[in-house]
Image (cartoon, rainbow, N blue to C red):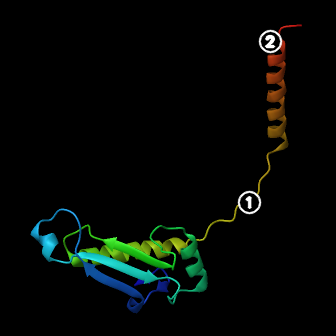
Amino acid sequence: MRVKHLFIPDSEITMTAVRSQGAGGQNVNKVSTAIHLKFDITASSLPFIVKQRLLQLNDQRVTKEGVFVVKSQQTRSQLNNRERALARLQSFVSQALISRKVRKKTRPTKSSQRKRLDTKTKHGQLKKSRRQFE
């Protein structure tokens, strides 16, 4: 499987066919169309930085051991479910490839600071003028 500039060998992805849940009558009871996809992040051939980012994504599909688990059972075709599961893995790995922009620290301008303080003093004077004298 190819993700942008990375290649994940098929040997690192484990897919098993299981019976799907829900409605479907005899087809659901007889045919194993759902796909369980497992991808061990820690044991993969991905670069170390990508592995770290994947584990830090805090995704519920990643177990404590660092295994990405997906179950695909949307369609009645095992082939389509297999493709959907691989697409989910691809989108998961592509999330880690996106590097975040470094935030530039900014400061408010002098005029905006002055305006803020002026409105505060005006509001305070207004409240002060509403007070009853003792």
Give the x, y percent position of residue 31. Answer: 16, 77
Relative to 129, say whether 85 is above or below: below
Give the x, y percent position of residue 19. Answer: 22, 75
Relative to 7, say whether 52 is above or below: above
Estimate how packed mark 2 is, as few (under 14), some (14 to 19) or many (20 or more) residues with alpha carbons within 10 Å: few
Relative to 112, say whether 75 is above or below: below
Q: Disc 2 designates what residue?
A: 130
Q: Residue at x 22, y 69 (%)?
A: 75
Q: Residue at x 60, y 85 (%)?
A: 48
Q: Disc 1 designates what residue?
A: 104
Residue 23 lies left or right of residue 55; in this view the side is left
Residues 78 and 25: in front is: 25
Mark 1 and mark 2 residues within 8 Å of each other at the beta carbon:
no
Relative to 33, say whether 129 is above or below: above
Give the x, y percent position of residue 98. Answer: 56, 71
Q: Secondary structure at mark 2?
A: helix
Mark 1: amino acid = Lys
Q: Quadrant of residue 109?
A: top right
Q: Residue at x 15, y 65 (%)?
A: 24
Residue 121 lies left or right of residue 15; in this view the side is right
